[in-house]
Image (spheres, grey):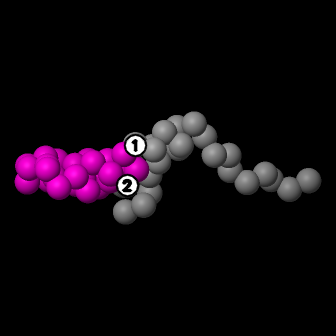
Amino acid sequence: MTDSPSRYTCHEYREEMLLLGLRRRLADDSLSAAEKEALQKEIAELEKRMGMA
């Protein structure tokens, strides 16, 4: 019997949905420069935690 592939967890799903929501908010043209910068920083931190950066 071979090892099963790693399981996709609720935590991973939650992080992906959070990232998607942050990216959607970033696309909002009514955001101030400071809000966009904060969102970009949060996205970068989340991507790093997820191993994407």
Where is mark 1, residue-wise? 18
- The answer to whether one can see residue 35 in this image is yes
Q: Decide whether the magenta segment is chiefly helix, strand or loop.
A: helix
| Part of the protein shown in magenta | 19-44
Q: Residue at x 47, y 48 (%)?
A: 16
Q: Residue furthest top?
A: 10
Q: Residue at x 73, y 54 (%)?
A: 5
Distance in Å between CA atoms under marks 2 and 1: 10 Å
Q: Amino acid at mark 2?
A: Glu
Residue 24 lies, in percent from the top left, at 32, 51
Residue 31 lies, in percent from the top left, at 14, 49
Q: Residue at x 17, y 55 (%)?
A: 29
| In front of the other: 53 or 24 | 24
Q: Which mark is residue 47?
A: 2
Does 13 appear in magenta? no
Q: Quadrant of the C terminus?
A: bottom left
Q: Amino acid at mark 1?
A: Leu
Query: Closer to the N terminus: mark 2 or mark 1?
Result: 1
Left or right: where does residue 35 sit relative to residue 48? left
